[in-house]
Amino acid sequence: MDFDFSDDQQQLRDAARRWVDKAYTFEHRRAAVAAGGFRREAWDALAELGLTALNVPEAHGGLGLGAVDAMVVMEEMGRGMVLEPLAQSFITAKVLAQYAPAAVQADWLPRVAAGEALVVLAHQERRARYHLDKCESKAVLTPDGYALTAHKSIVPAGDQADAFLVPAVLDGQIALFLLERAAPGVRTRGYLTQDGSRAAELEAEHSPATLVTTEGLTALELAVDTGSAAVCAEAVGVMDQVLAITADYLNQRKQFGVAIASFQALRHRLADMKMQLELARSMSYYASLQLDQPAEQRRRAIARARVQLGQSMRYVGQQAVQLHGGIGVTDEYIVSHQFKKLTQLEMTYGDSLHHLGEVAARMQATAGVVDH
């Protein structure tokens, strides 16, 4: 089996990396945070590169590429800790292409591909924790269509998005709706998150919405799994940079007249960071490769990957800060921001403890037991 990336995937990686290196330096990112955590010009640049069209079917103006291509791009976004929620375009493309009626696809997917419409997943509720089957939002059928009443939290770039994918209970079961931010009764309150990106509280009061599918829970699971695979890839990109910066620092920092990289104890810790990174990388590949598998197999794979990624993110981030000493926690130095980014990624779409529970719940009854 060939595990090498194709030439097209390498070119895609190179294009994304060049943009990050040129247009999304640490200084650019700090300016973006100061400006509110989201820049429309950066989003437009991602669209010009074709990245928002990556997973949109060709029939709707997209590139029709797959999960591995998205993974390659998200690794490069992680290297620059890009604030704009590119992964949301992958989620939207995946869910609409698989579940939405043809008219909804024709209306929204071309705009998603062109970057003209930022559509984000708005599913998190205060009492739900990470459980997707807990939903207090309600939808009703009116003479004019569907009306949605909901309160969703931590919606990525919610006050900048053009529309939302919103799960709500319809006739006793969860359905998935597309809600426009400009719709009557919709209110958003934006704020910065811990890593400097932008999120919002979303409220809808009897707001008109478009039904995507009555199979809301299965569609939501696909959306969250797609987002989780993107989190894994993004985290690998962040950790790759953390390791490179830490190794460079150890080679430059001197004590007793020699570089501290020559100290065996520190070299061992750096080697352990590298091992955790490579474990994370392999599980990120595993997660992306399983995205198109049947739901049960996909959900089990994503949970496994997230457990390893969570362990790796915590270890690499903590070791980087400790090996840098006091400078590692200063706002002026990039490592402190990378640590915050890794910490926030670890809790996105479920923290490590949640996913460990998912792994345990999805183990077969005979796992680890010899059945005579």
Image (tube, helix red, strand yellow):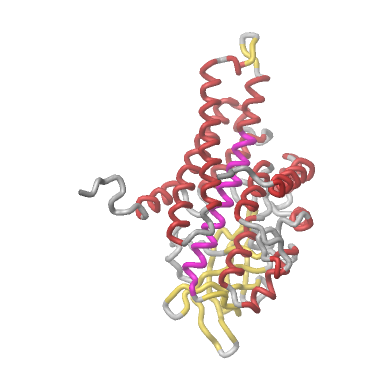
**Residue 43 highlighted magenta (yes or no):** no
**156 is higher (above) or lower (below) than 239:** below
**295 is higher (above) or lower (below) than 194:** below
Which residue is painted at 70% across and 70% down in the image?
59
Residue 55 location, quadrant: bottom right
**Residue 285 placed where, x, y %?**
55, 46
Please tell me which residue lies in front, 9 or 3: 3
Residue 144 location, quadrant: bottom right
**Residue 279 placed where, x, y %?**
51, 38
Count of numbered labels shown in the rendering? 0
**Residue 92 placed where, x, y %?**
62, 64
**11 is higher (above) or lower (below) than 111:** above
Which residue is painted at 60% across and 80% down in the image?
208
**Residue 185 placed where, x, y %?**
61, 76
**122 is higher (above) or lower (below) than 337:** below
Magenta residue span: 215-242
Task: Assign the magenta stretch its main secondary structure.
Answer: helix
**Residue 218 highlighted magenta (yes or no):** yes
Q: Is residue 97 left or right of residue 301?
A: right
Which residue is painted at 43% across and 54% down in the image?
300
Please tell me which residue lies in front, 329 or 60: 60
